[in-house]
Image: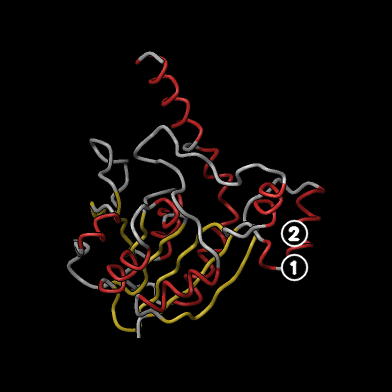
Amino acid sequence: MTIHSATHLLTEERARTSGEGYEVFHAPRFTVLLGLCERHVPSRQARVLDIGRSPFSAMLRGRYPRAETLGFPLPPGGDGSDMPHLVYDLNQAQDGVPLPAAEPFDLILLAEVIEHLYTAPELVLLVLREALAPGGILICQTPNAGALHKRLKLLAGYNPYERLRLDRTNPGHFREYTRAELAQVAQRAGLRVIEHRFANYFGGGGLRDMVFDLLCRLVPGFSRGQTIVLARD
């Protein structure tokens, strides 16, 4: 493979995993997530941290004026938003590096992020716990490792998990988790489970998705996604 062809592949990969298509695809998930935020942290004056800036961050800022984001450095010149941004790689939790926050947060969102980290989730949640105010809430949203479509693919001899992507700034999923694993990780990090729910955020709404949704109502553990709400006592 030449340098030119590798660059072309990388450009295609970045186009596929960003842009307006991402916002439309994740819209149902954003709705569920914002509803959970409003229910568990109703105060508009709450200090909120959204890990991984995305279209959802702007929605969050509209509800919580003190919301800010955390993640990799923004592009030169920023992204056109006045939303505060903390530069921090959650994999730094492996070395016990604390978040660069001046005050604790009332709510931290770790949505569709934990599966992208190569660091043990206990270490990540420990660092986030230290950044939470007493009584603060952490909402973690992530794919369900035991989803039905993954089980069926494995039975058919196909790997249900994607290969690492070409873009090292967005390599894809290193590890996905089951409900029991998430609860165990939270307990080891000193966080209390308040709520857990399975859901299918994604899908085209066709007959196949309708049948799948019906089946998941009978067996929630077959669902594609999951959200766990944790609290620091």
x, y percentage for residue 81?
Answer: 32, 46
**Is disc 2 placed on a helix, strand or loop?**
helix
Which residue corresponds to the image point at 56% horizontal and 60% vertical from the top-left? 31
Q: Please name the residue shown 25% across and 73% down the image.
A: 130
The x and y percentages for residue 171 are: 41, 41
Tell me if residue 42 comes above or below residue 113 in the rendering.
Answer: below
Residue drawn 40% across and 54% down? 57
Location of residue 165 (image quadrant):
top left
Q: Is 59 left or right of 156, judged from the image as shown?
A: left
Q: Nearer the viewer, residue 35 or 98?
A: 98
Query: Which SS class for mark 1?
Result: helix
What is the C-alpha distance between the residues marked 2 and 1? 6 Å
Kindly indicate whether the residue at mark 1 contacts the one at mark 2 (C-beta within 8 angstroms).
yes
Q: Is residue 46 left or right of residue 158?
A: left
Residue 204 located left or right of residue 8: right
Please rate how many residues cluster around mark 2, counting C-alpha atoms within 10 Å: few if below 14, some from 14 to 19, many from 20: many
**Residue that carries the numbered disc 1 in the rendered image:** 217
Q: Residues within 10 Å of mark 1 (few under 14, many from 20)?
A: few
Give the position of the C terminus as an image quadrant: bottom left
Rendered-image quadrant of the N terminus: top left
Q: Nearer the viewer, residue 185 or 228?
A: 185
Task: Name the residue at the bottom extreme.
Answer: 233
Q: Amino acid at mark 1?
A: Arg
Pointer 2 residue: 213
Q: Residue at x 41, y 26 (%)?
A: 10
Residue type highlighted by circle 2: Asp
